[in-house]
């Protein structure tokens, strides 16, 4: 049974925070193993004072469905506590937001992918707190897809954005606490950082092996399978291919009106991709790309998570689409996540090389082989920051 940083803090009855004035960066998945939200736990303690709440993308309550809609802060009518959005006018806390705080407590469930914005909100908070002399405490949680290891291209820092602010691969294999320590060291952030590590966690565990309740961290990651597929199929956001948003199986269903479903499924089967099977299907997204239109495509069926490679599989899907529909597959144009110049796909991939290789008709396995040196270098660099076996 795994106990999160929040669980252990609750067990100690917040004694280590006695007399502290704190801010909380939380979202709907910030719950203890009894499904009580972190904010409720903190607010019920008389040992400390909660001064301010902060919310990342999708909001503290997770109510924002659309990927790019920004939300604004509000004052909680029940407690009178000010709530600040870090996915609106400001992505980094301002000095006024941090005024009066001794500590900023960060309790966010990550999804294990470089492009998931919660960890970059964490990093920006660390930078702001370092400048204002506010201690940062990260309450660690499991990486839900940790057994997949590391995969995908490294971020070229010339393409850094709010979906990638540190030189890590697309599938990084770290917990949020480990990533915080890594960034603080490698990027020389200088934050006064404390991580409340988990107890009983092993890197070989899928989320469902931890005994913890799964609360989807954002609206389009409703299940563990969607988390498993996400680190690769999030790349489709940078194309005109629906990644399944607006369906009940986001990141497991993909296609477009011009796609020949049978041909796509057969081409993907030809590559004998590990741990995956593909079923031709048709779907009609309720919102986002191709909303209300019938799309041809496939459903990804996960046969063996331990050998499945989400980034390789997504790249194979894009290679097949370029081969079968050379005039259909298109790269979306800017803007994306406030990036006004570079192509959205390049921002997601972490550079222009992957797009160029797909357009050149390269074999997906040959493309993936090119990631090995970068992944090995990252593993050596991050070794000092690993806390769990």
Image (cartoon, rainbow, N blue to C red):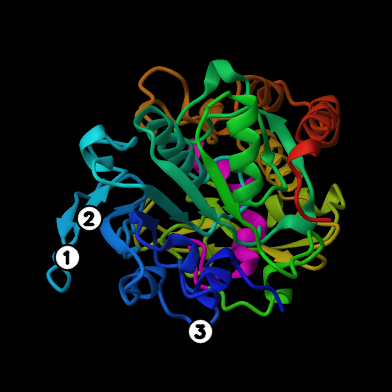
Please say whether residue 225 is visible from this viewpoint.
Answer: yes
Label pair 2/3, CB-CB below 8 angstroms: no
Residue 89 numbered tag: none
Alpha carbon of mark 1 to alpha carbon of mark 2: how far? 7 Å
x then y, percent, for residue 79: 17, 70
Crowding near the residue tagged with mark 2, few <14, some 14–19, many ≥20 C-alpha atoms within 10 Å: many
Q: Is residue 222 magenta?
A: yes
Quadrant into which the N terminus falls? bottom right
Residue of label 2: 83
Q: Determine the residue positioned at 38% across, 34% down.
A: 133
Residue 76 numbered tag: 1
Q: Which residues are magenta?
A: 215-242
Question: Closer to the N terminus: mark 3 or mark 1?
Answer: 3
x then y, percent, for residue 136: 46, 45
Q: Determine the residue positioned at 28% across, 41% down.
A: 98
Q: Secondary structure at mark 3?
A: loop
Q: Determine the residue positioned at 49% across, 62% down.
A: 16
Residue of label 3: 34
Quadrant of the image occupied by residue 370: top right
Which residue is nearer to you in this view: 175 or 269?
175
x then y, percent, for residue 192: 51, 38
Q: Residue furthest bottom?
A: 34
Q: Is residue 102 magenta?
A: no
Crowding near the residue tagged with mark 1, few <14, some 14–19, many ≥20 C-alpha atoms within 10 Å: few
């Amino acid at each position: 049974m795994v106990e999160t940083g929040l669980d252990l803090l609750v067990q100690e009855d917040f004694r280590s925070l006695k007399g502290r004035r704190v801010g909380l960066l939380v979202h709907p998945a910030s719950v203890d193993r009894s499904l009580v939200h972190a904010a409720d736990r903190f607010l019920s303690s008389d040992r400390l004072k909660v001064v301010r709440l902060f919310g990342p993308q999708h909001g503290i309550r997770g109510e924002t469905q659309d990927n790019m809609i920004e939300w604004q802060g509000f004052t909680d009518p029940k407690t009178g506590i000010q709530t600040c959005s870090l996915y609106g006018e400001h992505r980094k806390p301002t000095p006024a937001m941090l005024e009066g705080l001794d500590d900023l407590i960060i309790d966010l469930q990550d999804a294990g992918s470089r492009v998931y914005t919660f960890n970059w909100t964490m990093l920006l908070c660390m930078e702001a707190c370092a400048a204002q002399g506010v201690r940062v405490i990260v309450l660690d949680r499991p990486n839900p897809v940790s057994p997949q290891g590391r995969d995908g291209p490294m971020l070229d820092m010339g393409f850094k954005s709010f979906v990638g602010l540190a030189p890590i691969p697309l599938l990084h294999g770290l917990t949020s606490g480990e990533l915080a320590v890594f960034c603080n060291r490698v990027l020389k952030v200088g934050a006064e950082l404390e991580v409340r590590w988990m107890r009983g966690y092993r890197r070989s565990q899928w989320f469902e092996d931890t005994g913890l309740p799964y609360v989807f961290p954002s609206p389009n990651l409703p299940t563990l399978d969607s988390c498993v597929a996400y680190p690769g199929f999030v790349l489709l956001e940078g194309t005109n291919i629906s990644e399944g948003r607006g369906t009940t199986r986001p990141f497991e269903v993909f296609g477009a009106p011009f796609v020949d479903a049978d041909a796509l499924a057969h081409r993907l089967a030809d590559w004998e991709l590990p741990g995956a099977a593909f079923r031709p299907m048709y779907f009609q997204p309720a919102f986002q790309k191709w909303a209300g239109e019938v799309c041809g495509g496939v459903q990804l069926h996960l046969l063996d998570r331990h050998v499945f490679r989400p980034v390789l599989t997504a790249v194979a899907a894009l290679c097949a689409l370029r081969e079968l529909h050379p005039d259909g597959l298109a790269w979306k144009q800017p803007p994306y996540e406030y990036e006004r110049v570079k192509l959205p796909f390049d921002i997601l991939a972490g550079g222009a090389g992957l797009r160029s290789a797909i357009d050149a008709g390269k074999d997906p396995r040959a493309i993936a082989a090119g990631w090995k040196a970068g992944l090995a270098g990252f593993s050596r660099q991050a070794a000092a920051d690993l806390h769990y076996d």
